[in-house]
Amino acid sequence: MPEKTGTVVDLLLERGAAEPDRTAVVLSDGRRISYGELVQRVFETAEQLPGKGLGMSSRIGLWFLEGEWIDYAVGYFAALLNGSVAVVLPTDSDRRGIRRICRDLGIDHVLSAAARPFGSAEVQDVPVAGPATGAGRGGRPVAPLDPARLADVVFTSGSTGTPKGVAASHEALAGIADGYRARSGGAAVVAHGVSHATAVGTRQLLLSAVARGSTLVACVPFEARSFLAAAAAESAATAVLPAAAARSVARALEDDPALRPAGLRTLRFMSDHLPAELHLALAALLPGTRVVNTYGLTEAGDAHLVTTQQDCGLGPGGFPAPGTEVGIMSASGDWLERGEEGYLCIRDRLPALGYLTDPMAAARTWRDGWTVTGDLALIDGTGRVRIKGRSRGLARVGGRTVSVSEVKAALETLPGVEAAAVVVLPHPTLGQSLAAVVEGPADAPAEDVKAALAGVLPAHAVPSPVVRVEQLPRSRTGKPHQDAITALVRRRMSASSRPCRTATEVLVGSVWSGVLELDGAPGADADFFQLGGDSMAAVEVLAELEGRLGVDIPLDLLFTRSSVGELARELDRLRAER
């Protein structure tokens, strides 16, 4: 059994001293860095930080593009070496969003690539050191790293809501690394197409590479043919990809079987469920390669479920990975027996993680070392977890309960639909309504999808509208990005209605656009609540219209006249009666 790691910084320094010439990271363009050079650049970068006033527990943002894996690795370990907290900033947020995160977390320094500074008046740039010069002193932090001290923050994908910063201690990171050393073989080459700004990218791929002395082949941004070529060229034994990449990998292999990497032993797809037919197709295209689909959460550390070719036909879920424990909890917090459906809870033997700034959400998510995932599931007689849907994945349409996951599953069985996302929208009379975005050929009519669904779902569960796109908006983990998908649906609903014609319709549309922060003015048929409005926004809209038109408007008017045209006509009537 390997000796227990002090911190992952210690592990990196040991790796650099023992195997300085071993390649640590290779990029898809051929650039690479050895463990010895990585350690040297980490020291040179860390030596800048105390002079910037950054020390123990200072929060340092890490802002790197997807293709900057080498610079990211330098910046991440430099922050840890300094005793600071490495806050891994999301790559799918724009600069305004990053500045907001920095402001909320008290970050005033950001490590970034020397050639591409962050460039903000509010945040100072600290460029990571370039190719090693040998000038670094190789010193240690001012004080030894406390295992219980906060080490890093990685944000959730935002696929089910606003991204949250999940914090881990040095002890938790060292435990993850120790787990990889204990259950994995020696050094290997791992090809991947995973963002560094994810728990898989940082807390699994990067830490496992340092723990085992592996080489990471980072093919990000991802393109299937170049990924397969790089995996073959570097003799990768393992490959890790988001589930969203599976279909393009299958197509590339179908078009050119010579792309199959000969030495590839394991191909792992993560972040989302892999449909059984696609799982089996990939296994057939890659004889001798074990194709697996894993499920985990940023909040759950290294705990995850594994689905293989043998059980992929049983639906989402899987068997617990080594070191992972699972349980099912009732809404009242009681543990349930096998076969009983409740909330999936998962844990490993590492210290629990936590949300950096949301203690109330943390109390709901972590209980006695368990992560409560929010998935409705059961454990069957074989010990396999079967996920039935999300606890928040229910809609009430006209008083009837609809399972969003069942609607999504029905969509994905239709010809020409490669992936789907379902959006729940507020509705003034039904309470809620459903809309859908489907991925597939853009020239196929959306009405065909609705007609096909009418044969398998009750009328109230058929989404409307159905929007076709060539590719779903996805988060940096490859999951469908729910906020972006909802915004897409609302834009399409707004644009699909007739244009505003009267002066009052134009005025109402303009006020809605300002209050709801729409990209453009909505059409006359657009519905206020389906565009994202709520009671607070309704009060703001009516107050502004009262001031602009000089009439008293009943507070409930927008709830009974919820389209632009209806509200405009009622406002014209009120003005005429004044």
Image (cartoon, rainbow, N blue to C red):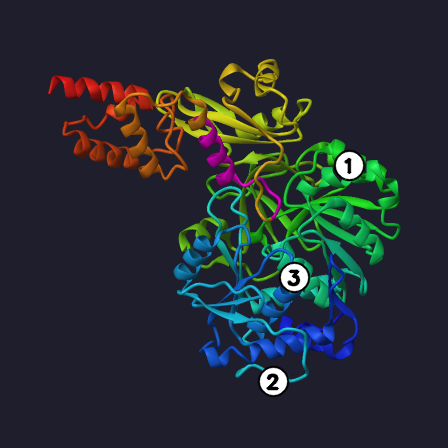
**In the image, residue 150 lies at what x, y percent?**
51, 68
Question: How far separated are the C-alphas under marks 2 and 3?
Answer: 24 Å
- Element on which disc 3 rests: helix
Q: Is residue 149 visible?
A: no
Q: Is residue 182 above or below residue 163?
A: below
Region in magenta: 477-493
Circle 3 residue: 69
Circle 1 residue: 251
Kind of residue sitting beneath label 2: Gly
Question: How far separated are the C-alphas under marks 2 and 1?
Answer: 50 Å
Tell whether position 204 is magenta.
no
Kind of residue sitting beneath label 1: Arg
**Nearer to the camera, 533 or 225:** 225
**In the image, residue 406 lies at what x, y percent?**
58, 27
How many residues crowd around disc 1 within 10 Å: few (fewer than 14), some, or many (20 or more)? some
Circle 2 residue: 139
Identify the residue at horizontal 57%, vertical 62% (top origin): 351
**Nearer to the camera, 224 or 321:** 224
